[in-house]
Amino acid sequence: MEAKQKATTVLIHVILILISITMLVPFLWMILTAFKTLSESTSVNPFVIFPSEWITDNFSKVIKNMDFPMLYLNTILLIVGRVVAAVLTATLAGYAFARLNFRGKNFMFSLVLFQMMVPGQIFIIPQYLMVSNMGMLNTIFALVFPGLVTAFGTFLLRQAYMGLPKDLEEAARLDGCNIPQTFLYIMAPLTRSSMVALGIFTAVFAYKDLMWPLICNKDVMPLSAALAKMQGQYASNYPQLMAASLLACIPMIVLYLIFQKQFIEGIATSGGKL
């Protein structure tokens, strides 16, 4: 029985290692291509994996041709704006749907679930018309606008608040706390891990958002939209594109390294997933 259990454990570890290697291959290929010449990157020889000469010209050309400081700034403002708005609105709405009783609560929450069930692309035209009528096209606000409210975050925080015992609210009520005080001082601090998880999810979603920035903005662009414009219709300089992609990965790598512990805790306690 022990031998069978050990064999099963070894098999599981082998499968997980193979899956991890498979997931790392695109990232490693991006790094290797960033140091290749254009001819090497488009070579059909399957044995040309490592560059014959490690060159850094692709990085210098990309940095010279693209305004990376401004792209980083736009991306950071986009992420921060969406994270703050999503956490604030989702926390308030999640608490209301989970702990308060009011007329039409079930119907309104069904609308939130409906928004999660349909593709987000159907909201692009109404969102564009709203931003256009406000005269806010080609601004940071236009980038942040679709993330002012989040159905996923509302659902995530609602589940977190529903998991808290009712005794906490009853004790707070006996101590003389009203609903805002109970929410602010008792309930909200207990869902901090879920808020952090929602913030990280929102940051990832905002970072990889491509379609909306290309539609609403012409000049004020984040990294994802700027990278998309580097790809030509008939030909692309893949080494420079991979070099720019590698530079664009820096914000997410830094974000993960800083909030790695909170990210794992948030997933474990909230039950959320990507």
Image (cartoon, rainbow, N blue to C red):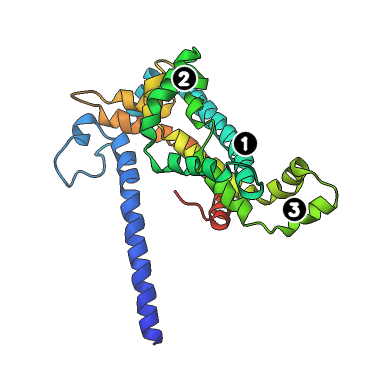
> Contact (CB < 8 A) between labels 3 and 1?
no
Q: Quadrant of residue 198?
A: top right
Q: Secondary structure at mark 2?
A: helix
Residue of label 1: 88
* x and y percentages locating residue 62 in the rendered image: 36, 24
Residue kind at label 1, given as amino acid type: Leu
Residue kind at label 2, given as amino acid type: Met
In depth, the one of 239 and 83 nearer the eye is 83
Name of the residue lying farthest toward the top: 135
Residue of label 3: 169
Residue of label 2: 130
Q: Is residue 261 among what the camera can see?
A: no
Rounded to the nearest angstrom, the CA distance separating label 1 from label 2 is 22 Å
Position of the N terminus by quadrant: bottom left
Q: Which mark is drawn over residue 215?
A: none
Rounded to the nearest angstrom, the CA distance separating label 3 from label 1 is 21 Å
Residue kind at label 3, given as amino acid type: Glu
Determine crowd level at label 1: few under 14, some 14-19, many 20+ residues with C-alpha closer than 10 A: some
User: Where is 40 relative to 70, above or below?
Assistant: below
Residue placed at 19% from the left, 31% from the top? Answer: 39
Residue placed at 35% from the left, 22% from the top? Answer: 61
* x and y percentages locating residue 271 in the rendered image: 52, 56
Name of the residue lying farthest toward the right: 175
